[in-house]
Image: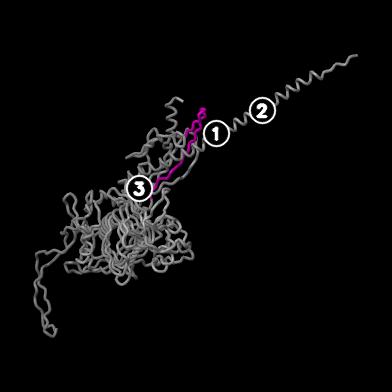
Amino acid sequence: MKRMNYRNGFVLPVAMGIVVVVGIVVASVAGYVSWAARSTRVFLAKDRCRFAAQSAIEQAKAEIQHGFSDFLGAGGTSVRIDPKQAASYNWFDTVSGDYRTIGSQNPVTLQDPSVPVNGCTVVVGIGMFVDHETNSSFAAVPVVATATYVYPDGLSVSVTIQETVCFATGQSKVFNYAYFVNNYGWMNGSTITINGDMRANGNISLSGSTVNGFVYGAINDEVGADGSISLRNSPKIKKFSEYRRSYATTQSRPDMDDYDTAGAYDAPSASTVISLPAFNAEGKVISGTVGASSGKPICNQAADPLPMPFVSDLADYVEYAQEKNGTLSYPGYSYTDSAGATRTVSGGTVNAHFSGAGPSGDESLADKGSLVLIGTASNPITINGPVVVDGDVIIGGYVKGQGTIYAGRNVHIVQSVRYKNPPSWSHPDSNDVQNESNNASKDMLGLVAKGNIVVGDCSSSSWYSSVGKYIDGRSSSSVVESYACDESDANIGYPAVFGGDYTAVESVDGNSFGKVRAVDTGETYVEYEPVYDWRGRQTGTRPVTKHRKAMETSMDRRYYETACDDAILSSFSSDVACIDAILYNNHGIFGTPNGGSSRFNLNGSLVCRDEALIFSGNGVSFNWDIRLMPKANNRVTSALSLPVGPQTPYTMSWQEVPESLNPAYMALVNSSGD
């Protein structure tokens, strides 16, 4: 019987099976490699797209911020804004149907980059839901960008990013400086020390002074300034040990050597003469004075201007003060008016707003709405939150509490203003956290004027001989500039563009503004005066005919003068050796501080458009109050309620989203028929 052999028939199927399996494996590997290569390309392209989309969003944020600032005011060095900002933020509620344009007035239209960004085409727009709650001081704006990268073989990759950005206002950044001037900044004299940063929206001149901080000059087309800093007579900066030992009072800021808070003194390693920086091709400082840890140059020329807000319509501030329940209490006082009558004015309490009779007691006179505030150590002026005074504020003496007085016209500082419970910063500081907590509740006063802040008795001839030539725009010694004014300042005599002459009579459209003074009524009366012999003994009396005088509104007033009777200034004036306050106004700060045998100290901050303080005595110190730094203690700045300005936008949320959430992108896709 023959045996059949099946071996040959079995080998072929096995071989074929192996080939098939190998083919499957090879195909799988090839497919995986292809998938992995494609995934890698997609991954790399997405990174490209994220960078491109984020770049477009950053540009869009800057454009929106600039547009909003333009809407608030001049868009350059000055902004006009009410303290609540609710109406201002309605600007964000208007968004075009294609989600490209935002803004009710002077709107901003976002444009796609004209050239590829990182190889990607980018479409940028406003997200579908802008969040602005009624009566809130911020707007949350979703800014969305879609970036697309296309490989040469046609592979297309897109990424859409949506960043929700908060546009808000808060305490203006001008208060981050010991000295901030919107026009021309100057400090001339070897006895002047600024313990804090110094900045001008214009040019700065330093001659022999000491600045323990940074100095910024800014470009300002409004006043024709290129932001240059002029250094003469070797201005200086102090190192840590000298700052602590010789220059830092207990009310001046601590240094960064032992204090971990923004705003502390960043001193160089050695005391030196301040010099301008020189930069290499990469923009690094190769010479010039720099800070200790930051490496940033002490002098910074041609910086961007920092917008300074105007105190606008006073009615908005009245509403604001009423909502914040601000209060002001003050003691009574007596004085002899220019007509020779003795007047006694009772003390009282102001609830948010004062608009009553002034010190003359007659509501028909020009001093209506003005207050005289003279505090003593035992009976100080007490402030809590913001309070609005319609007219002038004449102030001196002791004050306690935390808050700001808004004057509808001028603030006249006729004697030293001192905190009853001042802050104290030890040098060195062994416990910065505890020290900051202790100082958070200490006294803090803001003095804000729609007009000017005037130091000293401006009714005296000596005051004018010291200050007049510096505030007269026609004088060769003038340090003031011409600038645009807030339209609401027409109520106190300012034209649309102020020529810079503070010695002129206030006048708008041919109408001048009066002040209170004694005038002859035309009536006479007889008064008996004593008669003395050669030994000084009274021997009798004699009749003397005198002219009767009365207080009236009759005299045209100048910008620096008070609307009140000048006798009030002379009655309470004494050397202004110290000002514990944050000084801020729409126009100028000028006058005659005099520390006498001691140094004059301004403890707080000085902010204005023009400055002409003419010092006498044994030196001057500007000591910036570090509590003004918003991050230091928000409770302090909230209680103070100082003028506000635009803040740097910040990111509330960031996420990658589907392309369908970019309306601008979808509109382009739909229009192309894809």
Whether residue 69 is visible to the viewer of this picture, yes or no, is yes
Label 1 and label 2: CA atoms lie apart by 22 Å
Is label 2 in a helix, a strand or a loop? Answer: helix
**447 left or right of 438?**
left
Quadrant position of the N terminus in the picture:
top right
Quick one: label 2 or label 3, which is nearer the N terminus?
Answer: 2
Identify the residue shown where x is 11% and y is 80%.
Answer: 531
Q: Position of residue 348 (x, y in %)?
A: 30, 64
Is label 1 in a helix, a strand or a loop? Answer: helix
Q: Which mark is residue 85?
A: 3
Label 1 and label 3: CA atoms lie apart by 49 Å
Amino acid type, mark 2: Val
Label 2 and label 3: CA atoms lie apart by 69 Å
- Main structural element of the magenta stretch: helix, strand or loop? strand
Q: Which residue is mark 2?
A: 26
Q: Position of residue 477 (x, y in %)?
A: 22, 59
Identify the residue shown where x is 18% and y is 53%.
Answer: 507
Q: Which residue is mark 1?
A: 41
Amino acid type, mark 1: Arg
Quick one: label 1 or label 3, which is nearer the N terminus?
Answer: 1
Q: How many neighbours does mark 3 have within 10 angstroms: few (below 14), some (14-19), or many (20 or more)?
A: many
Magenta residues, as a range?
147-169
Q: Position of residue 29 (x, y in %)?
A: 65, 30
